[in-house]
Each structure stands twice: as structure tokens, then as C-alpha cells.
Amino acid sequence: MADAASSPAPKPEGATGALVLSTGEVLWGRGFGAVGAAEGEVCFNTAMTGYQEVMTDPSYSGQIVTFTFPHIGNVGVNDEDLESKVDGAVGCVVREDVTLASNFRSGGEFGDWLAAKGKIGLSGIDTRALTRRIRKTGAPNAVIAHDPEGNFDVPALIAQAKAWPGLEGMDLAKVVTRTADESWEGSTWTLGAGYAAAEGDDRPHVVALDYGAKDNIFRNLVKAGARVTVVPAETSLEKVLELKPDGVFLSNGPGDPAATGAYAVPVIKGLLDRDVPIFGICLGHQMLAIAAGAKTAKMFQGHRGANHPVKRHEDGVVEITSMNHGFAVDNATLPDTIEETHVSLFDGSNCGIAIKGKKAFGVQYHPEASPGPQDSFYLFEKFVGMLG
């Protein structure tokens, strides 16, 4: 990687895309997908599969995903693997050019799908070097740009990257949340059968606060035996209680938990005061911790991938998990009322809590996977089992 103080690398012949960092560095490559320019934080994801699920995860709002696996896009896209209809990642950086799709489930080409979604792709980048840079110096702000004619105003793109404020202090949940209540229907997907139907009206009722949720979370709640109503992020405590929940779910989502917590934490505190069972994932986990007296902090590089080992303190079992987060609960700030239940074996960061004396717990990782291993489905069953 070029030194941060050096001049931008000159554009090589044939370059139609660029990743312009706020430090002034420019990584040239070949653009695909949507044409234009978009700013975001550059992160990396180590998953070998599931690029469509990653790109449609609302937790990636405001981020440019660098895929460490070199062959991205070669199995195409399909309508069944979408995780959300709202914005996810603004763009992606890949090593190899996207080839024609080769998969029996494919319904289209990755590049065409990106263009239709307004997302920019950039290939021909040394993603290993970029990943090492992020690990060494942290996740930079940047602009990803694509122009088929190769015309770029580099100084303007550098200025755009420098002007973007970054994710710290940013509330993105209200940008990606649903705008109306929704009764969720449908369970998990299986090959040849599609999505299973929900069964029975006597299931315990879960009200899910949508801070930028992945749809597979709701499918797993249904699979575990719940009836699910999804509500917008800014739904009031009074409205949640009017829905007569047997339990409340706090979803994943993008941005800074402290910023979203300005309106979400008072609701969570009200639920805790009323002893309503609560289960939180990712951003929801972080805000549950804040509501119980802990603090969160921006991580240096974050955790994103489908191979993260997490130790469960209760019995020492190690779960291989899917993760996507750039903020974490500061385990040094956990009060006596919070029990740490899980911890990352990569860096010791907090990955799970339980509120003492309450039926309330959360995990930092994604037990619904999609993509990723399914070691942690038991957490949905644990939550729904509390509601009987």
C-alpha cells in the first residue's frame, strides 16, 4: 500500500473504478455494477460464501465491503437469498473480475444485480494488501467510484472521502428500518421446498424492534415457535406494550449504538422495568447492555465473517459464528447486574450478556447466520422457551 503522505497513484490505462481513501491514497481497478460514487467506511469480510446475503444485510449500511475470498459473484444472484429490501452495503471490493454465473439456483448476474440496486463494485484490487492495511491502521473512510469512461476527478473524490463524517456518532437505524408494523410470515428455507409456513395461532407473540434486521432472524424466530410482529425502530414503549408481547426482540442494525440508543435505550429500560423477556442480537445486544448500565466503543477493525470462534462461559463450548459489527460492548464497563456469557476467542471482546434477575440476554454475533454456521440456533429456542 502507498504511504499515506504520498501523492495519489496515477491512473493506469484501462482503469474504470477506484477506491479513494480519506488519506489521499487511490486504489485503481475495474468498476462494475452501478455507475457513480459513494462514500462509506471500508471494512473486510472473511466469509467464503453468501456475498448476496452480506450485500443485503442492513448492518452494512454506510460501509464498503472488501471480500477476502477472491472469487465473488461466480454463482450469480437469486431472489431467495436477499436479507432485506432496504439498503445494505454501498459497494464492494473484490480481487478477481466477476465471471458469468454458474449455479443452478442463479437467476441473474451479480454485476447486473448490483447496478439495479445502485451499488458499486470494484475488481482487480489486491484485497489481501487492503485487508492488512485495515488490520494495521483501522477501517478508513473512502469513496468507491465507477466510470466506464475512466474519467475521475481525484481531488474532488479525496475531498468527498475526507468530508464524510464516519460511523461514530451516526444513527443509521432510522434510515434502514421498516416504516410500518408487519406481521411476519414464513420460516426458514430448505432446498426444494423454499420457505416453510408458520403453523398455529397459539404461538407466543414476539414483538421485534427493527433497527436494520436481517430477514433470516424472523424466520428463525418462527422456526423456534414464535408468532412475530415487526415494528419500526422508533416505536414507543407504549405502542410496544399495546401489542401485548410475550417477549421483545431487539434486532441487529448499522451505525453507532450510542446514537440509536438515544431513543431505543429508554424503551429497553422500560421493558426491563416491567420484566418483559428480551433477546438482542448485535446492535440490539449493544443497546441492551447500555440500558443495563454498560458502555460501547468503536472497534479498531471490527469483526466481519462467518468463521469467528466464541466461547460460552457456562460450559466452555466454542461456537463458530457469523459476525458483522464495528462497535462492541466494553466488557470493562459491565456492572454487577450484567453477567458476561460469551467472549470472542480472537480478541477477548464481549460476545454475550445476561441481565441478572431478568429474562433478558443478548449476543454480539448472528445466530441466524445467512451466511454462516448454524451452531447457535439454540438461542432462538432458548428465547421462545422463556415465553411460555
Image (cartoon, rainbow, N blue to C red):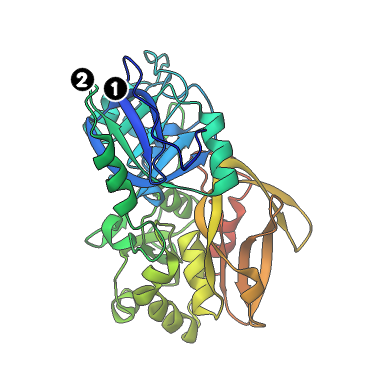
Position above or below: 87 against 296: above
Type of amino acid under label 2: Glu
Alpha carbon of mark 1 to alpha carbon of mark 2: how far?
Answer: 6 Å
Could you classify mark 2 by the number of other residues whose Cα lies within 10 Å: few (under 14), some (14-19), or many (20 or more)? few
Q: Which mark identifies residue 149? A: 2
Q: Is residue 112 left or right of residue 312?
A: left
Tell me what residue is drawn at x 68 percent, y 65 percent: 341
SS for dot 2: loop
The picture places residue 282, in percent across and down from the top left corner, at: 50, 58
Image quadrant where residue 379 sits: bottom right
Q: Are marks 1 and 2 in contact (CB under 8 Å)?
A: yes
Find disc 1 in the rendering and name its residue: 16
Image quadrant where residue 386 sits: bottom right
Q: Is residue 196 visible?
A: no
Tell me what residue is drawn at x 45 percent, y 82 percent: 269
Q: Residue furthest right?
A: 316
